[in-house]
Image (tube, helix red, strand yellow):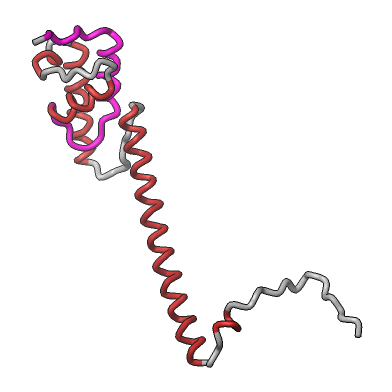
Amino acid sequence: MSSAPRLTDSDIDKAIELLSGWTGKLTWRAYLVILAMELPHGHVYSKVAMLKQPRIKDAWNIARARLADDTKDAGEKRYGSSAVGALRRKLDETREELRASKALNNELLEQFQRWQFNAERHHLKLSQLDAPLVNPRAPVEKKIP
């Protein structure tokens, strides 16, 4: 069994950055797994190892306090500046775009069904409905007999 790689200053900076951008529920398990994905060596450190680092311990306490305040305030989401925060922001934006697209699609489907019903009611043929559009600004070609 090999020992864990020592935390470098760069690793500690990444760990602190991750905490500063954390949103949602903060647990040691989730934090350590995501931190392992952010670190180049991918090692999953223990909670004890993290708490031995004063800067990480302070950042953890600050993040916990910030997140506790965020749950009290039902205000705007904070994403922070970490890669995880950026991905969460993008995910939220994409979900909102998807919701809007689905709503528009449903409106268009309802409109199509109305048009289809009215077309059948007025005895319109498919060839009439599928006829090409005429551009009123286009010059009219006169046929010479």
Which residue is at the front of the view, 127 or 106?
127
Which residue is at the front of the view, 46 or 55?
46
Say which quadrant the N terminus sits in.
top left
Residue furthest toward the right? 145
Q: Quadrant of residue 56?
A: top left
Looking at the image, residue 23 lies above or below residue 62: below
Looking at the image, residue 29 lies above or below residue 43: below
Residue 3: within the magenta? yes
Write down the region rendered in magenta: 2-28
Say which quadrant the C terminus sits in.
bottom right
Residue 8 at what x, y percent from top left? 25, 7
Q: Residue at x 15, y 15 (%)?
A: 50
Residue 61 at what x, y percent from top left? 17, 22
Residue 14 at what x, y percent from top left? 29, 18
Residue furthest toward the front? 145
Marker count (numbered) = 0
Left or right: 47, with 112 as reference point: left
Q: Residue at x 31, y 35 (%)?
A: 78
Q: Quadrant of residue 45?
A: top left
Left or right: 91, with 107 as reference point: left
Q: Residue at x 18, y 26 (%)?
A: 33
Which residue is at the front of the view, 31 or 43?
43
Residue 86 at what x, y percent from top left? 36, 33
Left or right: 37, with 47 as reference point: right
Q: Residue at x 56, y 87 (%)?
A: 125
Residue 63: within the magenta? no
Q: Quadrant of residue 30?
A: top left
Left or right: 48, with 80 as reference point: left
